[in-house]
Amino acid sequence: MTEEEVLSEFRASEALLEGHFKLSSGRHSAHYLQCARVLMDPMRASRLAAALAAKLPRELRAEIDTVVSPAMGGIIIGHEMGRALGKEAMFLERPDGTFGFRRGFGLKPGEKVIVVEDVVTTGLSSKEAMKAVENAGGEVLALVSIVNRSGGDVEFDVPYHALVEITFPTYAEDEIPAELAAVPVTKPGSRK
């Protein structure tokens, strides 16, 4: 899938929003990608996951034992990545503020995992998810996401593959431009 094809999937599902948004990372943006909307169509979610899986190097695909994704945003795309790769998929939750496995999910020592996200902005959730996998005895082979909107400002200890890179600017609380500050802020993300 090309970048334009991916963005057309977001536009078709009215998942590319404009306004003033406070992202889950705490940063502000005039654009928001509502991955839950783009993934609510099972066929679209399947197409995006298949395209993302196809983007992974063959050697990496051969090594993967399990797909793990953080709740909430990563659950659907993680499940679809599991389907695309023919691997089991499970998710992490934050019942006490820190990611961990629940619902009978767990890893065998040395289990080889890819962590799947919907969007990566600051990488904090991704790093926390990877740490939870390692704490559970797994080995993180790579991080993958539908969208990389980090602008290249984030580094990971494992390879990172995204279906599309989008460089909508984001702003810290103290650097919001006046024209954006004049627009009422909404917080559409999954974290309070």
Image (cartoon, helix red, strand yellow):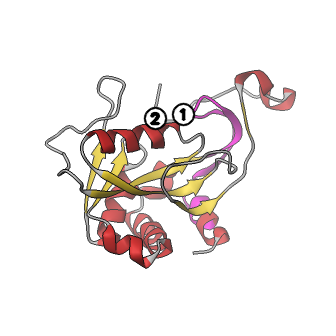
The magenta segment: 8-32
User: Does dot 2 land on a helix, a strand or a loop?
Assistant: loop
Residue 168 percent location from the top left of the image:
73, 48
Q: Residue 144 versus residue 157: which sits nearer the camera? A: 157
Do we see residue 58 in this rendering?
yes
Q: Is residue 25 left or right of residue 54?
A: right
Q: Residue furthest right?
A: 178
Pointer 1: what residue? 24
In magenta segment, residue 16: yes
What amino acid type is highlighted by mark number 2? Ser
Residue at figure coordinates x 50%, y 73% from the top left? 55
Residue 48, x across and y down, in percent: 47, 67
Q: Nearer the viewer, residue 44 or 147?
A: 147
Element class at badge 1: loop
Quadrant position of residue 123: top right
Is 149 placed above or below 23 here?
A: below
> Label 2 belongs to which residue?
190
Q: Which of 55/19 is in front?
A: 55
x and y percent of residue 161 in the render?
53, 62
For residue 140, above or below residue 103:
below
**Rendered residue at 35%/63% (across/down):** 80
Q: Residues within 10 Å of mark 1 (few under 14, many from 20)?
A: some
The numbered mark at residue 154 is none
Q: Is residue 20 visible?
A: no
Quadrant position of the N terminus in the picture: bottom right
- Disc nearer the start of the sequence (1/2): 1
Q: Are marks 1 and 2 in contact (CB under 8 Å)?
A: yes
